[in-house]
């Protein structure tokens, strides 16, 4: 149901983690995700711990889903001296190409315990359906 748009994103994520650089609006960091089908719904879960809901932006244009989020540093008093800072800050983004079989008009989003969960229903036109056979008069005769 999903197609990855950039096969080198995982490599970029690893390099950013090792170098300690955070994402910017022009070059955001990738966010980890899971994607699976649950019956007639496709579910995508993004890990965004420490991100407030007002810092998450979800867009869909045609079949391209874009999720952007920003983890901002916590406000600290002038007397606070940071001893260790390992949690990544900055901008995170993920773009996914959605299949035509998904109904992008009815996407639902929930955010709980640092996990953004999108539920995308399978489009009605993509679901299997039974075709009934009508009782006809039999084969048609061609007159010469």
Image (cartoon, grey):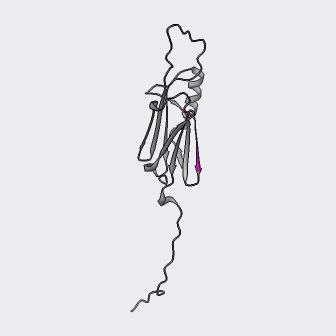
Q: How many marks?
A: 0
Magenta part of the protein: which range? 31-37
The chief SS type of the magenta part is strand
Most distant residue in the top direction: 79
Q: Is residue 3 above or below residue 13?
A: below
Q: Is residue 20 above or below residue 35?
A: above
32 falls in the magenta region: yes
Dividing the picture into quadrants, the one containing residue 55 is top left
* Front one among 108 and 62: 108
Q: Is residue 132 above or below residue 88?
A: below
Q: Is residue 100 above or below residue 24?
A: below
2 falls in the magenta region: no
The residue sitting at 54% across, 9% down in the picture is 80
The residue sitting at 49% across, 83% down in the picture is 135
The residue sitting at 51% across, 29% down in the picture is 51
Q: Position of residue 104 (x, y in %)?
A: 45, 49
Q: Position of residue 141 (x, y in %)?
A: 44, 89
Most distant residue in the bottom direction: 144
């Amino acid at each position: 149901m999903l197609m990855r748009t950039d096969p080198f994103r995982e490599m970029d994520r690893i390099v950013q983690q090792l170098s300690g650089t955070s994402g910017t609006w022009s070059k955001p960091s990738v966010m980890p995700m899971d994607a699976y089908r649950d019956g007639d719904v496709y579910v995508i879960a993004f890990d965004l711990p420490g991100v407030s809901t007002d810092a998450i932006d979800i867009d869909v244009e045609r079949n391209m889903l874009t999720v952007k989020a920003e983890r901002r540093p916590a406000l600290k008093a002038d007397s606070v001296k940071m001893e260790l800072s390992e949690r990544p800050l900055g901008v995170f983004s993920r773009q996914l190409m959605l299949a035509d079989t998904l109904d992008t008009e009815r996407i639902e989003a929930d955010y709980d315990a640092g996990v953004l969960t999108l539920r995308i229903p399978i489009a009605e036109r993509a679901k299997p359906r039974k075709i009934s056979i009508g009782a006809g008069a039999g084969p048609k005769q061609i007159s010469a």
